[in-house]
Amino acid sequence: MALVKANPPGIPAVGDGKPTPDGPASGLPPLIETGPSVEDLLAALDAEESTTRRSAARALATHPEAAMALCDRVEIERSPSVRVVLFTTLIRLQSPEIAARLAGLLRSEDVALRNGAIEALQEMPAAVAPSLRALLADPDSDVRLFAVNILGALCHESAPEWLVEVIASEPHVNVCAAAVDALAEVGRPEAVPALQALRARFPDEPFMTFAIDTAVRRIEGR
């Protein structure tokens, strides 16, 4: 019978089911696999495959330094699913700089892109606040209308006050109507005098009268 040479102490035989020297029982720290670098992820945002772009956008949610590159990408991204992830990542990274970039998309002719920006900004109350006054004073009434839409869903303590300022000075009936609808949801009793004054500014607009009555009734009923 052939003799079997014993392994040196501490080194188990191959295939005996015991941990190898570089395994958990060896006393050595486990190997840590590092993920792709920020540079690799940024490059992947331009990949041909949408799945690659989507994965990169998701992975960049922990990298604030990638914020402007993500803003650049969302402006040109054509895949709806990738665009959703880009907006979600930007919400997680939210900052006044990101909000300002997204606010620029309120002028976009791409309805889906514009609506995505509005919905994202509604989730950034503190970040979007510095941009709101400029948006509410924009020469384009459509931009002002979109800003009111943001305010109506914004969890910010000053939102009701800003909406009152809108109906006190806004010349466009559609923007005022949107602000009235928003005040019906978030308005405080202090808004009622401004709402009543608005009625006198648009006496020939039946829908405005109805909207004001509804808003006042809801505010006073809270």
Image (spheres, rainbow, N blue to C red):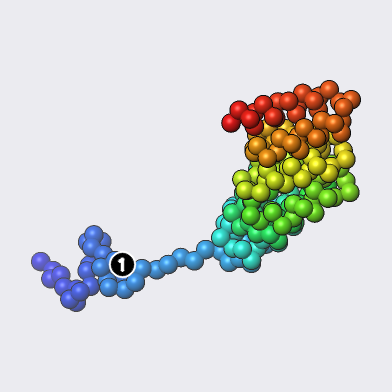
- 197 w.r.t. 34: above or below: above
Whether residue 87 sits left or right of residue 107 in the image: it is: left
Residue of label 1: 23
Locate residue 12: give its quadrant.
bottom left
- 145 w.r.t. 9: above or below: above
Find residue 82 and report its horizontal and vertical position in percent.
Answer: 66, 47
Q: Residue at x 79, y 50 (%)?
A: 135
Counting other residues with Cα less than 10 Å from the Cα at mark 1, is it few (<14), some (14-19), or many (20 or more)? few
- 138 w.r.t. 149: above or below: below
Residue 171 seen in the current view: yes
Find residue 91 and report its horizontal and vertical position in percent.
Answer: 62, 52
Q: Residue at x 70, y 46 (%)?
A: 161
Q: Residue at x 59, y 54 (%)?
A: 92
Q: Looking at the figure, which quarter contains the N terminus?
A: bottom left
Count up the numbered dots: 1
Q: Nearer the viewer, residue 139 or 72?
A: 139
Whether residue 142 sits left or right of residue 88 in the image: it is: right
Furthest residue toward left:
1
Furthest residue toward front:
193
Q: Nearer the viewer, residue 158 or 98?
A: 158
Find residue 81 and report its horizontal and vertical position in percent.
Answer: 65, 43
Task: Please name the amino acid that badge 1 sits on.
Answer: Gly
Locate residue 182: give its quadrant.
top right
Residue 120 seen in the current view: no
Find residue 137 and report its horizontal and vertical position in percent.
Answer: 83, 50
Q: Residue at x 69, y 29 (%)?
A: 216
Furthest residue toward bottom:
8
Whether residue 35 sits left or right of residue 87 in the image: it is: left
Q: Looking at the figure, which quarter contains the C terminus?
A: top right
SS at mark 1? Answer: loop
